[in-house]
Image (cartoon, coloured by chain):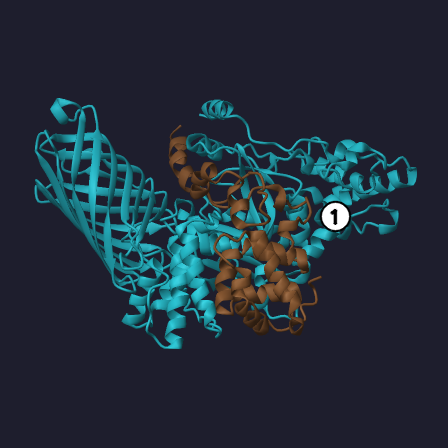
Amino acid sequence: MKKLVIGAALGTMLMAGTAFAGPYGTAGCGLGSIVFGSSPGFVQILAATTNGIFGNQTFGITSGTSNCSNTGGGTQSAQAFIETNREALAKDISRGNGETIKNLATLSGCQDPTAVGATLQRNFKTIFPSSDASNTQVSGAVINVLKSDKTLACERLI
Amino acid sequence: MTARIALLVALAGCGVVAQGPYTRDVLRAPVDQDRQAYIHALKIRAHQLHLAQAAQWLRLGHWRRTWSGDYESQADGTNFFLSPHGKDSPTQELDATLEGFFSELPANDPRLASKNVQHPICQFPARFQWLSEQLAIDPAKLPAHDCSRYEEFVKSLQADSVTLVFSSYYLNNPASAFGHTFLRIGKKNALIPEERRQLLDYGIDYSADVDTNFAPVYAIKGLAGAFPGTFRKVPFYFKVREYNDFESRDLWEYKLRLTDKQRDFLVAHVWELGSTFFDYFYMSENCSYHILGLIEVANPDVRLLDDMHWPVIPADAVKALYDNPGLVESVEYRPSSRTRFRHDIQDLSSDQRDAIEALADDPASKMSLGQKQSIEVLDAAQDLVDIRYAKQLIQDSRDSDGARIKQKLLERRAEILVPSVDAAEAVPWSKMPQRGHDSRRVALGGGADLQSDRWAAFGARLALHDLADPSDGYPDLSQLEFLPTRARYDVTNRRFELDQMDLVHIISLTNQDRFDRHISWEARLGSQRIDDAGCRTCYAGHVQVGAGGALSTPTERVTAFVLGETHVWSGPRLDGIGGAPIRIGIGPAGGLRLRITPELVSLLMGEWDWLPEQTGFSTWYASETLRWEIFHDVALDLEARAESHRQSGVLSTMLYF
């Protein structure tokens, strides 16, 4: 019994690698919708005390690659990448450089990540018109900007 | 004890267990006589070679010997076994596997629609490869099989390298107290440099499927192994955003030295594990344990799991890698947003720091700096806002303060059409988890007090680290102890006494400055022996919580802290409030920690508590601990302590193991 009591205290701390089998949100592949499911308040406490919090079948080994877990390149995977990395990417776009821009350029098949950074920075206000812009609006806008600047030659975006 | 756990689990409800159909129910054994004869010959050959007892076969099926000496597989999903007795019999599973390779799935069976059901060659590609090699199975004799789902999986990974990732401790996030481990499968792409594609790698993560958020049920089920644990394939960028940004945890990455064949074998085995689950035990069979099991399968020469002891702490997984010389090829470091921010502001002027602070509160505030300085300030202010409002931002609360302040800052930054430079990160090599002392500790020594009592002192601790322990590999300002216990054999009075036994004792100190206002705090739950005016050697349960602030030098070498503490003691012989057996104490505590070298730490602590309406009125103590790690995992500990009516000293040797 003692082992169990010790463990109970430890257990609440040692949540190394737990996942909440929550529903997948409807707002695209936003990090929040996947981390917290559709009921942020409810799951929040749990998420705060757990560790690996991505529990849904989006990531099952044998369930195949889903829209939100595709990193193979092309429009769909670029979209998922933009939505999940929104906060980090927004910063990088305002700075015209950064890891998320370089990886996005790779996914989109663009030749020169430096040029991609400059173009996105110039178009910051188009991509992020206000703090209310939804994740799907943002991903649509980024892809539009990349596609319409032909000099970038982002050949994997169709 | 087992019965009680069973009852608790029953009350809590059972974990979600994957339901059928199972491959073995759908499979049809070959009727063709040639094939039957061939299978028979293979089985005989396998028995002659004792393949069922071969280390690699046992690893592939995750069979371990139980205390009774029989084999049992740690895998708990029915579909992981082609024989109904497979969980307990490596031999029967081997026979069933050989037969399975030559069996067929009836084309029009409706059960084929389930993702559970695959042809054994596709479901168990690692078993198939290994047995093919051992028995020289003739591919021409195999039935037709379509492994397109497995092939798609392999193609999505494009595996080139395998890296064990350790996400480090950060006590202000309770989840990260012990860290976490998972694998990153590096993608093959010679044309594009790694920094431009690493986020697109996949992480292979083993975690529990939690189906409750009621904490007590959660803890009990977690300990009793009532949550199923499964492997997942997650884009690495999820992990980076989750750990680096949201939880402010640094990532340490250990690239493994594997041959191409070993790497591909690991990938094949990940796929096999995708069709099962393991009962997830927080303390033993946790994320670190099964990730190591995967690496063992890849390289039969490495030994990882045998050296794991209870409890399995994620940092132990890293240490286990280093117990196999040559297994770690290189180490990389990916700092958290918090670490990056700290690093980026180091070289900034005081004007710039003022501007960062102002911008994080009011993103429209005026700035009179040159362009380069402005860029540095705006970039740092963005990072600060990300850290401060991490929760709002990840929850996608678009009309929150965090989102609005950030938007305005980003707009200001984007107006300066000059790209920021990639930050060069200083890697804190001394904090690599494998450099830390081992997680368990015992102590043996002698003590004396001015009343001429003499005693032998004993100490033991299950995990993990306190403020005076050798500091390499651990955060300087955090203490996380489980089951710290102290006892003595009083030579003068010939008596054995338990001085203190805590379940948990945590101290989390955060240097307060203009950018970080996190409080410092302490929490403790356990029991201790009280020996003062209010009670002569009584044993009492003890709960303590405290909060306050800390100040530290930039390298965290000198740290001072003050905490307001509240204690509640309860014990049958206590003469507490109004004569009741409950005692309450409230008062200030303080400390000064000095890291003289990473191996030599001095910790001065003191506390005074008011005991309202209780005998003695107040109680106090002051103590100085000097701990010196003389060899790796061996330390000398000198503690001098003064209390209201007693002064004592203890010298002991501590052993981390």
Residue, disc 1: B149
Identify the amino acid type marked 1: Arg
Chain letter for cyan, please.
B
Q: Residue at x 37, y 47 (%)?
A: B440
Which is nearer the eye, A120 or A3? Answer: A120
Q: Residue furthest right?
A: B33
Which is nearer the eye, B460 or B578? Answer: B578
Q: On the picture, is A86 further left or further right than B114?
A: left
**Quarter of the figure with residue B89:** top right
Above or below for B435 versus B24: below
Above or below for B551 versus A105: above
- Quadrant (top left/top right/bottom left/bottom right) for the N terminus of chain B: top left
Q: Residue at x 12, y 30 (%)?
A: B536
| Residue neighbourhood size for the residue with mark 1, other residues' Cα within 10 Å, grouped as few (<14), some (14–19), many (≥20) | some
Q: Residue at x 80, y 35 (%)?
A: B27
Answer yes or no: is residue B295 visible.
yes
Instruction: Give residue B380's position: percent from left, percent from top.
Output: 39, 65
Q: How many numbered discs, if any?
A: 1
Answer yes or no: is residue B430 visible.
no
Output the chain of dot 1: B
Which is nearer the eye, B233 or A97? Answer: A97
Instruction: Give residue A145's position: percent from left, percent from top.
Output: 61, 65
